[in-house]
Amino acid sequence: MKALVTGSTGFIGSHLVEALIASGYNVRCLVRSTSDRRWIESLCVELVNGDCLDIDTLKESVKGCDYVFHLAGLTKACREEDFYCVNVKGTENIVNAVLQANPDIKRFVFLSSQAAVGPSFNGTPVNESTEPHPVSVYGRSKLEAEKIVGSAGDRIPVTIIRPPAVYGPRDRDFYFFFKLIKRGIFPYWGRSQYSLVYIDDLINGIILSVENSAAVGKTYFIADMEIHTNEEIALTIAKILGRPLRKVRVPRAIMPFLASIGEKFTKDKSIFNRDKVRELHYRYWLCDSTLAQKELGYKPAVKLEDGLKWTADWYKINRWL
């Protein structure tokens, strides 16, 4: 079994590559010349140079692969057009490359996001039958990408995975909050509720989806099946780090202004940007993984406190904290 992974050098992609190798797959990684390969350079993988914005490189990359896992995408950007260029056009390119160069593929898996559907507006977790209402540019771009993947479903077998916020070793988004909490700061803009998923559980859900024929043509939310408040998350991290916590109230009305200032200093590298603030205005980022549980046999194994502790330990060992 040969699998191509785009986004293989990233947080989720590098974990998927490791898990696929452990499961007996031969793994081909699509990498750009500028990619930071630290997480995969010691692994037994085939590296191919290419870019999701260059369809000619993609045609060669997908040849001979039984599975394609399309994880490459942009989660943070200051310009709206960047989201659409990478997330929409890049997805369109790789789908077309598969249709043209490898139409007999066994499965094409697209990693989307809960942001493509948007938050719950009444506190009831969203599920696969919820009408999408993305509230951020990122979310809209992922929904457009989902539509491209879905439109190819009559020609190649496709599956779409929508995780909520993902955390674990190598992640830089949660790392931002770990750093704040280590300093004793808990930015608080009101009580919010979230679904989360630890990286190992997400990877397990992705692999289960390709090993089950029921997943063909389907979309699944993969989460930890729990509801977490922002206070619970912050207090758990503070306990793990052994730090007292001071709640710093941040009025929602000034968050866009603060984010615009942050963008000037961090370019497109910070999780705290104007597009992310559009999502933070909503209180219920909850999703339901019942369908994955019933059809794929998915069962989350990692509790929040364990996952956050393992993440903190990794940050400490690698001197991020």
Image: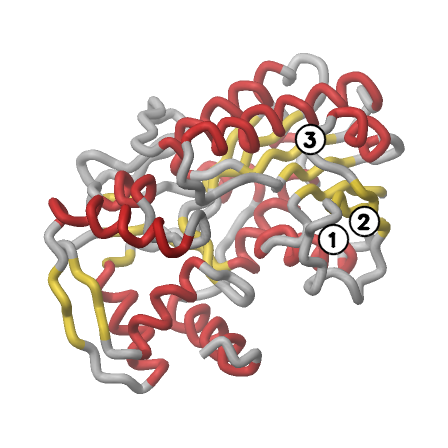
Compare marks 2 and 1 and give the one earlier in the sequence.
1
Residue under pointer 2: 27
Element under disc 3: strand
**Residue 173 horizontal side relative to residue 57, left or right:** left
> At label 2, which amino acid type do we have?
Val
35 up-or-down from 123: above or below:
below
Dot 3 or dot 2: first in sequence order is 2
Q: Which residue is mark 3?
A: 108
Q: Quadrant of the N terminus?
A: top right
Residue toward you, 277 or 244: 277
* For the residues bearing labels 3 and 2, Cβ distance under 8 angstroms: no
Relative side of 64 to 277, left or right: right
State if disc 1 and disc 2 touch (CB < 8 Å): yes
Judge the density around disc 3: few (<14), some (14-19), many (≥20) Cα neighbours within 10 Å. Answer: many
The Cα atoms of the two marked residues, 3 and 1, are separated by 15 Å
Residue 230 in picture, x, y percent from top left: 24, 60
Which kind of residue does numbered mark 3 sit on?
A: Phe
Q: Residue sitting at 52 percent across and 19 percent down?
A: 147
Measure how far apart labels 2 and 1 are at the Cα level.
Answer: 7 Å
Q: Quadrant of residue 184?
A: bottom left
Residue located beneath label 1 in the image: 20
Where is the C terminus found, in terms of image quarters? bottom left
Q: In this orientation, which residue lies closer to the viewer: 217 or 183?
A: 183
